[in-house]
Image (cartoon, rainbow, N blue to C red):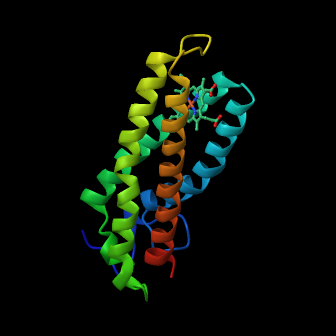
Amino acid sequence: MGFDGINAGLAAGFLPFRGSWMLDVVFLAMFAIVPTLAVSIALVKRGQYRVHRTIQLVTAAILLVAVIAFEVDMRFFTDWRELAEPSPWFSICHTLLYVHLAFAIPTPILWAVIIWGALRHFDDKFQAPGYRERHRALGWAGMLAMMGTAVTGIVFYIVAFVL
Ligand code: HEM
């Protein structure tokens, strides 16, 4: 698909940078994810288990839909290399993308494991003898992996499409 110079037509994003519409959506979502997860942890530490569960499940569902839409965009509609080419740092974009993918690919798998385990083990009073410690360890790994995904994604977007 031709882009008429840099970024035109359906592919054009709404931010004043070179990202496509979906790239812009995911870029903003990456900023939202860090405070959302921070709130979720703060609440679970105060015993607000139900809100924590809701935040985690809703976040996971939204991210799943966004990632699928994003993949469709990248595979069929948007050539990110073409949009990133004007960047003075274009030569390091591939490396930055691989660093981002090193977080972005394992994270959904880890989240699926965490959610599956939590839903299976915690009862309706959020009791789970013997599983709490495991969920905490997995949960912290999942939080850090998602924050790593967000930070490396933001860096990639800025270097590729803003500069
Ligand atoms: C990807 C999804 C999730 C992540 C990343 C996550 C993360 C975490 C983390 C980091 C903690 C420990 C906080 C601390 O240090 O005290 C925690 C605690 C907890 N989470 Fe999740 N969680 C997720 C999903 C869920 C779900 C779906 C449920 C409910 C079914 C749940 C129920 C709980 C409960 C009850 C605790 C408190 C455990 C305790 O008493 O120490 N979590 N979670």
Asked if residue 82 is positioned above or below residue 30 in the image, the reply reads: below
Say whether residue 48 is left or right of residue 141: right
Asked if residue 81 is positioned above or below residue 11 in the image, the reply reads: below
Asked if residue 13 is positioned above or below residue 44 in the image, the reply reads: below
Position in image of residue 135 (x %, y %): 51, 30
Say whether residue 129 is left or right of residue 51: left
Asked if residue 102 is positioned above or below residue 110 in the image, the reply reads: below
Position in image of residue 101 (x %, y %): 35, 59
Position in image of residue 21 (x %, y %): 45, 60
Res 3 visible: no
User: Which picture quadrant has residue 104?
Assistant: bottom left
Position in image of residue 161 (x %, y %): 46, 75
Instruction: Give the total number of marks visible in the rendering.
Output: 0
Instruction: Please state which of residues 76 and 144 is positioned toward the viewer in this rendering.
Output: 144
Say whether residue 157 is left or right of residue 97: right
In the orientation shown, which residue stands out farthest toward the bottom?
88
Instruction: Please state which of residues 15 and 64 is positioned toward the viewer in this rendering.
Output: 64
In the orientation shown, which residue stands out farthest toward the right?
46
Instruction: Identify the residue shown where x is 47% and y is 50%.
Output: 145
State ligand 1's quadrant.
top right
Which quadrant does the N terminus fall into? bottom left
In the orientation shown, which residue stands out farthest toward the top?
124
Instruction: Identify the residue shown where x is 43% and y is 57%.
Output: 22
Res 47 visible: yes
Instruction: Identify the residue shown where x is 47% and y is 17%.
Output: 121
Say whether residue 62 is left or right of residue 75: right
